[in-house]
Image (cartoon, rainbow, N blue to C red):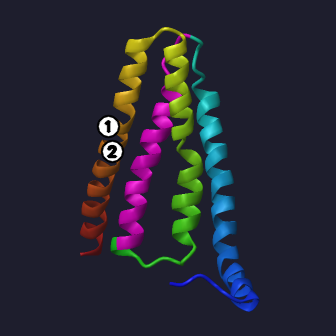
Amino acid sequence: MRPPRTAVERGSAVRDQAPVVAAVAVGGAIGACARYAVALALPTPADGFPWATLITNVTGCALMGVLMVAITEVWVGHRLLRPLLGTGVLGGYTTFSTFAGDVDTLIAAGQLARALLYLLSTPVAALIATWTAASLARRLIIRRIA
């Protein structure tokens, strides 16, 4: 698709994308609030392991696996469903920037082994959670439909 060239085309493109941007913004606010709630419920002590961030990222990835199966393989959802829930809510909920900051904090505190464990375990756990949740969702949803 070529980029809009005229003012009319640009205006039309902005109008077409405004609902998507709004859906992502609303979803992102919801997801960020949920992430903050998890962080409040599971505060990380100064010398502790960042469980809240790990749990948030792993559960967010698992939910993304379920969502993608549901809206790409089973149901045809509204065009704003994926931006709202996937990019917005789950994008705001997961926090790989905090994950990177947590690794840096652990290294700065001299906890190199804990930092390495966290650095390696988070993406592995997130990928396993995504695959497992998507596989289970596929089996459960398709079984119910059949």
Is 27 drawn above or below residue 39 in the view shown? below
Please tell me whether mark 2 sits on a helix, a strand or a loop: helix
Q: Position of residue 8 (x, y in %)?
A: 74, 91
Q: Give the spatial CA distance, label 2 vs label 1.
A: 5 Å
Q: Is residue 89 left or right of residue 117?
A: right
Front in this rendered view, residue 72 or 98: 98
Q: Amino acid at mark 1?
A: Val
Which span is picked out in magenta? 47-72
Is 132 drawn above or below residue 101 in the view shown? below
Q: Which part of the image, by quadrant, shows the C terminus?
A: bottom left
Q: Is residue 41 left or right of residue 124?
A: right
Is 124 drawn above or below residue 132 in the view shown? above
Q: Amino acid at mark 2?
A: Leu
Front in this rendered view, residue 114 or 133: 114
Q: Is residue 68 magenta?
A: yes
Q: Quadrant of residue 72?
A: bottom left
Q: Residue at x 57, y 46 (%)?
A: 93
* Chief secondary structure of the magenta portion: helix
Q: Residue at x 31, y 56 (%)?
A: 134
- Say which residue label 2 marks: 127
Q: Is residue 28 magenta?
A: no
Front in this rendered view, residue 74 or 17: 17
Q: What label does residue 16 carry, if any?
A: none
Q: Position of residue 117 (x, y in %)?
A: 36, 22
Please tell me whether mark 1 sits on a helix, a strand or a loop: helix
Q: Residue at x 65, y 29 (%)?
A: 40
- Say which residue label 1 marks: 124
Dots 2 and 1: beta carbons under 8 Å?
A: yes
